[in-house]
Each structure stands twice: as structure tokens, then as C-alpha cells.
Image: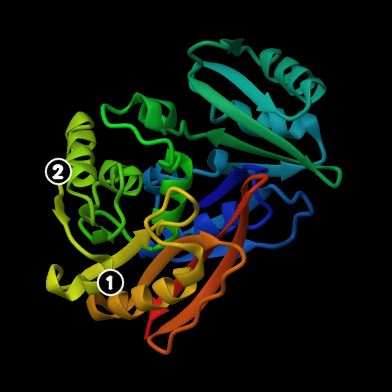
Amino acid sequence: MKLLLHLSGEHPELPRAEVIGVLEGEKIKYKISEEFMHKRLLIIDVDTDNTEFLNRLALTKSAGELIYISNNMDELASILSERIDGTFAIRSESKRTEEILGRLIWKRGYKVDLITPGSRILCFEDNGKYLVAIDTPLHKDFGDRSPEKRPFFHPTAMKPKIARLMVNLARVRKNCTVLDPFCGTGSILIEAGVMKINIMGLDISEKIVSGCIENLKFYGLKGNIEVGDALKMKNFINGVDAIVTDPPYGRSSIVTENNLEEFYNKFLDSAADVLRKGKCLVLSIPDKFSLENEEFELLSSYKLYVHKSLTRRILVFKKN
């Protein structure tokens, strides 16, 4: 099946990297088309008809089965008419494109329904050609899981969209086990749990651990959350399929800036003790730091602007 994805413009690299992370995590064979100039469009040929994995994606705006590519609107309308289920609506970056294609389909006897259409059509223009797909609705509900809506709140909590992204970069799937050894209020664990991934968490603070458990229960999630030192993970954990975490930094952190790099390096040593071979560690650190460890291969690194005093670097490592 060929799928057309309209990626978010929030970052030049991460939306595409997330798609690849999910495909590899789900063990889906894929091929990416490189022939289109539109930087936010991605065409992937996958060896499955199950598109449920699309709902995992945080930085994809819309997606669906690619139906046809043509520079002829009338030809597109004819092809689409064979796939419409009763009524239809069109979503495009261009209102003019929506109007022209919509009128051509309407003339073939199909009614427009902008509220509950039988088929939602995606249409994008690239270098004089139109790409059309039947939309697969994506259900993310990030707003329902924003930090301020949780019973236990902390101002440094990671936004759910970034937490979801980081879990997806870790190349895991349902029933794998993800560990966040600096779990805080549970942002990363909540997103992993929503995707039916098994979750484990550590935090040095008993109060924070209690709050994290409360937040997980609020969303109907369960996990193994304990008070523990992330620098001594082997004392608490036997083995995990991924580690995804946002270690402490900054003024609100228990770690001072002077020893932060040493702290991160000790953390990598600890992570190597519990992460299974060939599995991924994804962590977010301030951009000014760079980390190396002989136990890990750095797969990728991404700068992510947060605010004027903080630019994160998201690192993806694989355990050797």
C-alpha cells in the first residue's frame, strides 16, 4: 500500500525521522519515495494494509492511502469518484484546488458534506502535479494529556507531543517495555502507555514518584514506578527494550551545571547496564553538551528550540 503523509512544519527533520522510527519499531517493511519536491510531503510504500500505526505519529498532520498523481484535475475527479463512499469533503493547502476538484466530483453526482463525509480527500500540489489520497483520521488527543490537566502538576513537565515523538524515535511497539529513569510527572510514560507499551519509571523523589503514579491512574494506565537512582539502574531493573528520558538540568534541577556533563556520562554507563543489545536510548539534553560512550552508537541528533534560554538536543543511541 502506498501512503501519502503531510508532515508538520514544526521541525525540518524530526517529522520524517519519527515516521521511520515508528515503521522500524512496528517491523513494517517500507520504501520512501524521493521524487517529490514538496518538503512536507512523504510517500511511503508499506507491506501492510493496516494503517493503525499512523495514529502513533505526533508530527504528521494528515495521512491516507495514495490514490493517484496527475496534472489533470478531470482525470483525478474520475478516479476519485470510484472510491467515494456516499458523500465527500476535500482538504487542500489551496482553497482554489478544493473548489475546482470539488466541483468536478460534485458534477459526477456526489454530495459535499463538510461535517461527516463518507470520504475525506487529501489533495496536494507538487511541481505542477496533484497528489490525492483518501484521508485516514488521526486520533491523538494531546490536549487532553497536557501537563496542566493532570492531577499532579509540575511546571517543567514535558509536553505530550514531544514525549510521544521521543518514544517513537526509540523504535518500540505494543508490549515492548520502555523505561524512563527520570520519570517526573510521567509525560513520557503516559504517551508510551497510551500506545499500549509496557512502562517502567524511576525517580529519586518519593513525592514525584507518588505524583507520577497518580497521573498514570488518571489516564487508566499502570506501570512499575519506583523510587530509585538513575545512576544505579541495575539495582532496580533487569532489562528493558528502550530507555526514553529527559534528564534534569537548569536551575530547578538537583544537578548543578558544573557537574552536569559528568552526570550525563555516568547515566550512560548506568543505561548500558539495563538496556538490551540492539535497542535504543533516546534522551533530551541541553544543546551545549555532546555525549559519547563506547557502549552506544549514536544514530541521530536533532536540535529542538524550546524557548529563548533553552534549545534541546534529542539524541538517539543504539546499544552495541
**Up-down relation of residue 56 to residue 283 (above or below):** above
- Residue furthest right as drawn: 128
Residue 116: image tag: none
Q: Residue at x 48, y 19 (%)?
A: 118
- Check disc 1: other Cα within 10 Å, few if <14, some if 14-19, many if 20+: some
Report which residue position mark 2 lands on: 222
Q: Quadrant of residue 55?
A: top left
Residue found at the far bottom of this picture: 294
Which residue is under mark 1?
231
Q: Secondary structure at mark 2?
A: loop
- In front of the other: 130 or 230: 230
Residue 141 lies, in percent from the top left, at 40, 29
**Element on which disc 1 rests:** helix
Q: Amino acid at mark 2?
A: Lys
Mark 1 or mark 2: name the one nearer the start of the chain: 2
Q: Is residue 121 left or right of residue 291?
A: right
